[in-house]
Image (tube, rainbow, N blue to C red):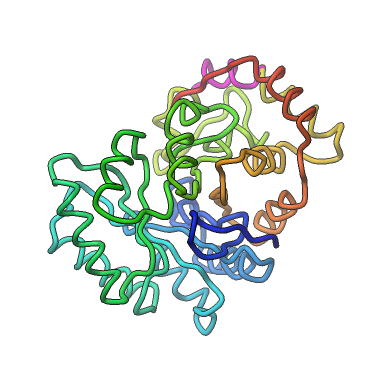
Amino acid sequence: METRQLGTDGPQVSCICFGAWPIGGAMGAVTDQQAIEAVQAAIDVGMTFIDTAESYLTSEALIGKAMAGKRDQVFLATKVSGQDHSRKHIEQALEASFRALGTDYMDLYQLHSPQPQWPIDETMGILNELRDQGKIRYIGISNYSAEQTVEALQHGAIHSSQPRYNMLNREAEESVLPTCLENGIGVIPHSVLAKGHLSGRYKPGDTFDSSDERSDFASFTREGMEQVVKVTSKLASWSRDHDRDMIQLAIAWTLAQPSVTSPIVGAKSAEQVRHNALAADWKLSASDLSEIDDILGGIVVDR
């Protein structure tokens, strides 16, 4: 799989990142064996950039089992979650991630979301110290606005930013993506498949178990999906005309954006991983992107 540089002076990472949120069970039940096979399939196809978080339920432990003996093949990213950015919590969270993942260093350690109650200069100072100690190699942020990104940059190097970004959610284009491009920050967007809206698997009337986060999303009610499907059905047709499907289109579209280094794409099975990986070879032209924009028609889909 093609690799791209993460940030101005960062490492080379696979151009598609395996997202671990689904294998933890947050989008429906996944057996441990199925989850482990999905991670192993990602490594096998060259999707060696793996993103997880302390809050992703059982995902860290499952990744640890899946990459046993293969740690040197993986660029591993996790996040400190929750509202506590104290030194004690960050250090304890990192050590807990080490234990679960079976490693003693993190390639990329990220702040899962901004927490203004904790001064960013202090938080970045803690991360800088952990980097200097060799416990983490690079620092990233997730769900930060452009203004919050600029503020964090004043206190240390940031190699990645993880905004929500996909064909149906493009608010990051207003200021977050330009800020990252201007400051040499690699963008690794999450929710590339819009929580499944861009998979083509769901239709109005489908329901979700209470353990699935989408059971609380307005866009996954019957009314919400009726509006979304008006657009996604056209995207699916356009994809078929190009001998692909909408999942691969969603990934390829994100890869075609100049600010994006590696879209984070979740999967629940080895089969899904292998299917997603094929999108890395689909290079959308300027004409393709213009046709897609015409289909989208400026649609905005919230949760």
Q: Is residue 78 left or right of residue 282?
A: left
On screen, 214 above or below 111? above
Q: Position of residue 261 (x, y in %)?
A: 56, 50
Q: Nearer the viewer, residue 283 or 62?
A: 283
Question: Which residue is painted at 51% across and 40% down in the image?
Answer: 191
Query: Residue most toward the bottom?
Result: 69
Magenta region includes residue 16:
no
On screen, 61 above or below 240? below
Q: Is residue 293 left or right of residue 205?
A: right
Magenta region includes residue 229:
yes
Q: Nearer the viewer, residue 170 or 219?
A: 170
On screen, 95 above or below 197? below
Q: Magenta region's main secondary structure?
A: helix
Question: Which residue is painted at 34% across and 34% down in the image?
Answer: 145
Q: Position of residue 246 (x, y in %)?
A: 71, 36
Q: Position of residue 151 (x, y in %)?
A: 26, 41
Q: Is residue 47 left or right of residue 233?
A: left
Rendering quarter of residue 98: bottom left
Which quadrant holds the N terminus?
bottom right
Q: Position of residue 219 (x, y in %)?
A: 49, 24
Question: Which residue is painted at 87% across and 31% down in the image?
Answer: 241
Q: Which residues are magenta?
A: 221-230
